[in-house]
Image (tube, helix red, strand yellow):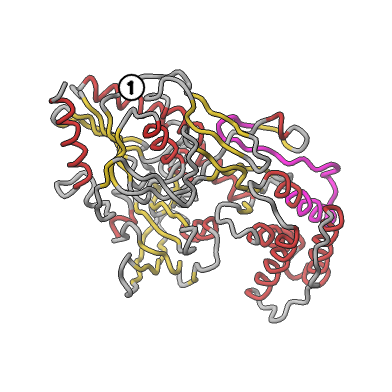
Amino acid sequence: MKLPGRALAALLVVVIASLSGAVIVQRERQAREAEQSVTIGTQNSVASVEIPDIFIHGSALDRRLLNASFQKIQSVYYKPVDDQVLVSGERNGLSEYLKTHGVAQPALPQLASTGDVTADQRVLDNVLQAAIDRYGKRFTDTVLMQQAIKGMLAGLKDPYTTYLTPDEIRQLEESLNGGDFGGIGVYIVQDPRSGQILVQPIENTPAAHAGIKAGDVILAVDGKPVKGQSLDMVEREIRGRTGTSVQLLVRSQGEKATRTVTVVREQIHVPSVAAKVEDGIGYIRLADFGTSSFDELRAAIAKTRSGGAKAYILDLRNNGGGLLDAAVDISSLWIKQGVIVSTVDRPGNRDVHQATGRYAPAEPLVVLVNKYTASASEITAGAIQDDHVGTVLGTRTFGKGVVQSIYRLPDLSALKITTARYLTPSGRDIDHKGIEPDIVVDQKVDPAIIDSPNDKQLTAAKNLLDRELAGR
């Protein structure tokens, strides 16, 4: 499912390499959000949206949840938002839901925004109330409220900004806290350019054993097309009870033919770090940037060093990302002081994340990357490259340079909103651009090739380090 086996891994161990590439959850700054949210977890960075008189019941509460979501988007989304986009999105979301559930021609008012926040909240209220009045008995007020919020967010056309049901946010929090996950063992990511949902199987999991290949495009899950669905929706459809099966219709990169792959779900546990020493070189693969990844990586460095390593390879290929804090901590192993990454919100406020002082460099260093190196892993690769403390080798990275924050609603659902973009230490904005390696070594993206005799990128990294060691 998506994020790798720990915080994020898990987060996408059936899910998105959000993250979504992957999902980055940014630590909320309490001062800025004091009026409307309160931080309840420094690592999970989940804030709660407060709504006065929350013990109101029925459609009044549903409207307040809708209004709270509208206000939060307008206050924290990383780009200016046109109210009409949200109004149209709400109506489209409700209309599409009703159509797919047997209402041929939904009767919903087609209203225009005014540009006045208070007036536009009433417009949103009127559309939702019309849906509740006509269809509430059939679908329930709560379901319609959820579809209204989902549609509103979908109007932004941002695959990383989504509504999470109470069950989905619970799964997300479990992911952030680490643990085992039921699913098939894949990372999924939505290409922001094509909208396609791509899959990366995790080694030695049901997906890999069933023949899912890196870069396969998911076209349908159990016969249901994924076009138009969010990453979270696709993740939910892929996950299921252990022992049950799921059918994926996929198409491999560069091919026209499609194929159906049946995968039996298992309890998925993905180690965050794998390490070994060969010929004096410590090879460390990092699967994700989760809550325990820093400790695991530091332990792996210590183990390889004691095993005779005199040079190191950090393999971030196919790493979909993870927690912003984990990226800062891990980067600080090689960067003694200064900026690791800066996040910039819509007003231009810059939050600078400095090296933590946990300096314990494993040098000389080569960092391996490819087109599925995304999000938090790009933060680390970019910081190491900008500070010239290692050589980045491989192919251009994915290019996910935005940050998401989680806001819990009083009904225990949540909003995942893109709240900032991030910049590397030198000020580079890599969103949709990626990171160009210092040394480009092209190679087919195939998990079977990684750490094998056919791994040209790994061979090039070893040769580079051998020369560097020989020159000392």
Q: Position of residue 259 (x, y in %)?
A: 33, 71
- Asked whether residue 143 appears in the rendered view, the answer is no
Secondary structure of the residue carrying tag 1 is loop
Find residue 451 and report its image quarter. Answer: top left
Q: Residue at x 25, y 52 (%)?
A: 442
- Asked whether residue 289 appears in the rendered view, the answer is yes
Residue sitting at the far bottom: 104
Q: Position of residue 363 (x, y in %)?
A: 27, 24
Answer with left or right where residue 317 lies relative to residue 332: left
Please check the rendered image and state whether residue 114 is part of the magenta-colored stretch, yes or no.
no
Please check the rendered image and state whether residue 64 is part of the magenta-colored stretch, yes or no.
yes
Answer with left or right where residue 192 lies relative to residue 274: right
Q: Position of residue 464 (x, y in %)?
A: 19, 35
Q: Residue at x 65, y 61 (%)?
A: 155
Q: Is residue 190 above or below residue 277?
A: below
Callout 1: few (<14), some (14-19), or many (20+) C-alpha neighbours within 10 Å? some
Answer with left or right where residue 32 lies relative to residue 328: right
Q: Is residue 299 above or below residue 322?
A: above
How many numbered dots are placed on residues in this image? 1
Nearest the viewer among 174 and 472 is 472
Q: Is residue 53 above or below residue 142?
A: above
| Residue holding disc 1 | 361
Residues drawn in magenta: 40-69
Quarter of the image with the C terminus is top left
Q: Position of residue 88 (x, y in %)?
A: 72, 66
